[in-house]
Image (spheres, rainbow, N blue to C red):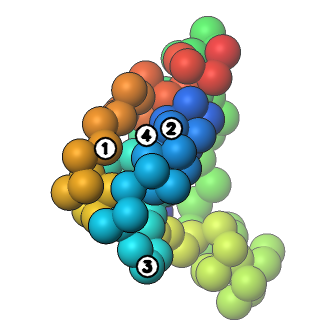
Amino acid sequence: KQYFTFVSARDAARALVHTLRTPSLTGPVNYCAPNPCTNYDFTKALGRALSRPTIIPLPKFAVRLLFGEMGDEMLLGGVRAKPTKLEQSGFEFEHPTVDEACQSAI
C-alpha cells in the first residue's frame, strides 16, 4: 500500500496561522491531515469529488519494468505522516478525511 499524505488548502492555511500564533509549537510540524490514506483511497475520493470514474491502477511490476529504481521511489513509495504536534497544540482540522479534503477543493 502506497500511503499518501494530503491536507486541504484551507486546513494548510489555518495550520500555518496556528503555528505562527502558538509560540510553544517549535521545530518541524507536519502539515498533513490526521487520517492518512493510500494512493488508491485518494484516487477514489478524487473521482467521487469530480463525479468521474477512476483509472485502473498501475501494477507494481509494470512500474518497475517501465521506470526501474526511480519508479520504486517516485511512484511506489509512500509516507504515512501524522500531524501529532499540530493536534497536541490544539489545532482542529475542518477537513480531516480525504473525501472532505477533495470536496473542499471543488
Residues under labels 3 and 2: Cα distance?
18 Å
Give the amino acid at mark 4: Asp
Residues under labels 1 and 4: Cα distance?
24 Å
Q: Which residue is mark 2?
A: 14
Q: Earlier in the sequence, mark 3 or mark 1?
A: 3
Residue 51 appears in which quarter of the rendering? top right
Q: Name the one closer to the observer, 73 or 58.
A: 73
Q: Secondary structure at mark 2?
A: helix
- Are the residues tagged 1 and 4 within 8 Å (C-beta)? no
User: Compared with residue 2, is residue 104 higher up or lower down, i.e. above or below?
Assistant: above
Q: Which residue is mark 1?
A: 91
- Are the residues tagged 3 and 1 within 8 Å (C-beta)? no
Give the amino acid at mark 1: Phe
Quadrant location, the C terminus: top right
Q: Secondary structure at mark 3?
A: loop
Q: Earlier in the sequence, mark 3 or mark 2?
A: 2
Kindly tell me whether residue 98 is visible in this rendering: yes
Q: Secondary structure at mark 4?
A: helix
Q: Position of residue 50 (x, y in %)?
A: 65, 15
Q: Which residue is mark 4?
A: 41
Q: Please rate how many residues cluster around mark 1, counting C-alpha atoms within 10 Å: few if below 14, some from 14 to 19, many from 20.
A: some
Q: Which residue is mark 3?
A: 27
- Are the residues tagged 2 and 1 within 8 Å (C-beta)? yes
Q: Position of residue 78 (x, y in %)?
A: 49, 69
Q: Name the one closer to the observer, 50 or 14.
A: 14
Q: Earlier in the sequence, mark 2 or mark 1?
A: 2
Nearer the observer: mark 1 or 4; the answer is 1
Nearer the observer: mark 4 or 3; the answer is 3
Q: Position of residue 60 (x, y in %)?
A: 56, 69
Q: Please rate how many residues cluster around mark 2, counting C-alpha atoms within 10 Å: few if below 14, some from 14 to 19, many from 20.
A: some
Q: Name the one closer to the observer, 57 or 27.
A: 27
Extreme residue in the top direction: 51
